[in-house]
Each structure stands twice: as C-alpha cells, then as structure tokens.
Image: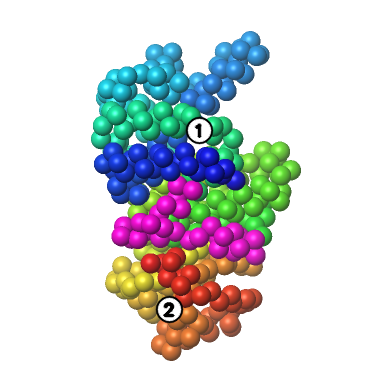
C-alpha cells in the first residue's frame, strides 16, 4: 500500500517529465519503467556481491563486470547531469546495457528490441534519477504498488486510445475466479497485464507454501501467465509490470489475438480473465477463420469471446467484461454466441455494472 508521502514523490517524478517536455502518458510510463529496471539491476548485483562477501566466494553470474561499473545506478547517479546523459545515450552505454540484458530470445529481450531512450535533456534525466534514488522500493510489493500507481495515470490518457480496467474491478474478478497453482491464466487483450499480475498476487497470498516447490516456481515464472497484445508500447509496459511483480520470464505473445497468427491458441488456458475492446468492428479478412465459424461477425466483443471459448481447456473458466449487447443484441451473431454459451458451456453469473463504469474502462 502506497503511503501519501510515496504517492507524492511519484507524482513529482511524473510532473518532472511533463515540465521537461515529455507529455505523452505512455511515453512517461515507459521511460520511468526503464529507469526502475536499471535501478533494479544494480540492486540485484549488490545482493549477489553481499552474498559472495558473506560466503567468501566469487560472485555467481554477475550482472555487471568490473569494466561496466560506470553503468550501475549506484555509480552514475552521482555524476554531473551532462556526463550521465551521455553515458545513457552512447553505444553500449546504460540504456543499451538494459536493452541487451539477459537472453536475447527471452521475453524481455524480445520486447525491448525497439525501445527508445526519450528523455530529452541532461537536467530532466538527473532530476528523475535523483527522485527515484530517494524512493525506497527494495521489496516486491512496493515496486508493484508504485508501478500500479503509475499505470493508473493512463486513465487520464484517453486521447492516446489506451484505457485501463480499474484495479478494484480486476481484483473482484480475480477473487471470484480464485486462481490456483495449477492454473494457466490467459488474457488475450493483455494491455498492461493488470489481470495477470493480480492473478499472480492472489496465488502468492493464498498458496505461499507452493513457492518452496521448484517445479511450481518454473510454472509460475514461465508458463502460468499468458498474455497477448499487438501494441509494442503496451507489451513492453505489460512485460515490465509482470517482471516488477516478481514474474521472471513473462509468457507474452506480440500478436493480434484475433488473427491467423494466433491460431495456435487452442485449449491452452484453464482460466481467462479479460476486458477486451468492444468499440468498433474489424475487417473479417483479418480474422482467424476458425473464430468466424463460431461467430460470423465484425464486432470485436463477439470475436474475442469466441477466441476465449476456443482457448479454454475442457473444464476451464472465464471472467470477462462485455457490453450489454452481448446479452441483449438481436443479430444472428449475438444469438448464436448466446446459444453457444448456454448450450455448450456453463454460464454461472452475470454481474451488471453501471454504464458509466464501462464507459470509463473502454473510453
């Protein structure tokens, strides 16, 4: 839980970007994300060094070599603004090191490939680094809360076409579905990965002993949470959200979930949690033919529901936000999908939310 003081500190960082010339909320979140991760790498290296000093052994799998000392947060944070700025921008500098961290075939390496350093001035970089240095975010819960608060600012970014499901709605849906350590949880319109992160936190809280099991940890960190997102910026933000919440190797797919490119999503998930887009329609030629067999429509909300039904394993369950049209629409496609839900699946509950709430979530 964020204290009022910490919330104020974060808003100061946010405002520093705005006054420094970076006004796009998504760009602000991306740049802060990169800085948080760079700081985290230095913290991880420090932990490795402390352990090695205690045990009298060499540092195992060091993140930084001795020659890369200047790339560490603890080193460059005290540099002159211009020196720090050039260190970030130069080839194989701080930003390049972060982009190339780990395995290039990993989720992190893949999604960071097209990341750009967008902080325009030495003064802004120095101010933000100084502010972040003053915030204690060593534990996972605080990092997660800080990031969630940053993401909440997307609510003011309607002009950018990005809308975030309110956290209390996500928590309600996750609680109703009660994820277990055996689940494979999927969000085919992942965005910032809020549903996946909250499902992970639910499992941490309700099944703490599972985290002593190596087999479960492998499952948790690699296969348990599956997200799909075609927007490059959002998938980077979502990946970092998951990493900062302790999911080491997020299983994210940079695809349009409704396209032929995603036709492998077939009986993979045991639980689907989602708030798919339901404004506008799509060109049928761009939609996977298998989905159109279930529902012949251009409406995204119907197509996404058909996709989810295909992606669920037998006995799987789903909690999905949909518009009233899914329940009351009179077209053939609406009627066919309702028949599919009633006759071939088990519809447990419909929870009605005020139209104002849905408008907030979908713009």
Q: Please report the residue visible at 64 percent of the width from the left and 52 percent of the height from the top.
A: 202
Q: Which class describes the residues within 10 Å of circle 2: few (<14), some (14-19), or many (20+)?
A: many
Which color mode does the image show?
rainbow
What range is drawn magenta here? Answer: 149-177
- 284 to 23, vertically: above or below: below
Q: Please report the residue visible at 50 percent of the width from the left and 60 percent of the height from the top.
A: 166
Quadrant of the image containing the C terminus: bottom left
- In the rendered image, the residue lying farthest to the right is 209
- 82 to 329, vertically: above or below: above
Does residue 161 show up magenta in the picture?
Answer: yes
On the picture, is 129 further left or further right than 59?
left
For the residues bearing labels 2 and 1, Cβ distance under 8 angstroms: no
Q: Nearer the viewer, mark 2 or mark 1?
A: 1
- In the rendered image, the residue lying farthest to the top is 56
- Specify the label residue 295 is tagged with: 2
The secondary structure that most of the magenta stretch takes on is helix
Residue 359 falls in image quadrant: bottom left
Residue 7 pos. (x, y %):
50, 43
On the picture, is 210 further left or further right than 265?
right
- Specify the label residue 340 is tagged with: none
Q: Secondary structure at mark 1?
A: loop
- 18 to 166, vertically: above or below: above
Does residue 52 show up magenta in the picture?
Answer: no
Q: Secondary structure at mark 2?
A: loop
Residue 77 pos. (x, y %):
40, 23
On the picture, is 325 further left or further right than 203?
left
Q: Please report the residue visible at 57 percent of the width from the left and 40 percent of the height from the top.
A: 142
Residue 13 pos. (x, y %):
40, 39
- Specify the label residue 135 is tagged with: 1
Residue 32 pos. (x, y %):
40, 39
Cα distance between the residues tagged 2 and 1: 50 Å
């Amino acid at each position: 839980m964020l204290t009022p003081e910490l919330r104020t500190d974060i808003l100061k960082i946010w405002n520093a970007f705005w006054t420094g010339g970076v006004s796009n909320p998504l760009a602000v979140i991306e740049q802060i994300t990169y800085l948080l991760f760079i700081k985290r790498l230095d913290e991880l290296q420090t932990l490795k060094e402390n352990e090695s000093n205690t045990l009298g052994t060499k540092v195992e799998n060091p993140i930084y070599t001795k020659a890369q000392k200047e790339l560490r947060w603890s080193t460059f944070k005290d540099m002159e603004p211009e020196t720090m700025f050039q260190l970030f921008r130069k080839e194989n500098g701080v930003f390049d090191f972060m982009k190339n961290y780990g395995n290039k075939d990993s989720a992190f390496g893949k999604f960071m490939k097209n990341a750009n350093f967008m902080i325009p001035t030495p003064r802004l970089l120095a101010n933000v680094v100084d502010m972040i240095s003053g915030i204690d975010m060593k534990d996972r819960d605080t990092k997660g809360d800080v990031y969630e608060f940053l993401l909440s600012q997307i609510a003011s970014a309607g002009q950018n076409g990005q809308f975030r499901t309110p956290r209390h709605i996500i928590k309600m849906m996750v609680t109703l579905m009660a994820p277990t350590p055996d689940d494979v949880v999927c969000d085919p319109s992942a965005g910032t990965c809020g549903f996946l992160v909250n499902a992970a936190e639910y499992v941490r809280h309700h099944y703490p002993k599972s985290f002593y099991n190596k087999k479960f940890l492998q499952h948790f960190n690699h296969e348990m949470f599956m997200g799909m997102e075609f927007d490059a910026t959002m998938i980077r933000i979502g990946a970092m959200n998951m990493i900062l919440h302790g999911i080491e190797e997020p299983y994210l797919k940079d695809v349009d979930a409704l396209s032929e490119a995603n036709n492998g999503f077939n009986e993979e998930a045991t639980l689907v949690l989602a708030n798919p887009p339901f404004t506008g329609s799509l060109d049928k030629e761009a939609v996977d033919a298998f989905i159109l067999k279930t529902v012949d429509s251009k409406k995204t909300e119907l197509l996404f529901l058909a996709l989810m039904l295909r992606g669920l394993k037998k006995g799987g369950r789903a909690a999905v936000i949909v518009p009233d049209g899914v329940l009351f629409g009179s077209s053939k496609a609406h009627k066919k999908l309702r028949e599919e839900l009633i006759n071939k699946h088990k519809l447990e509950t419909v929870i009605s939310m005020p139209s104002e709430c849905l408008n907030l979530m979908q713009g």
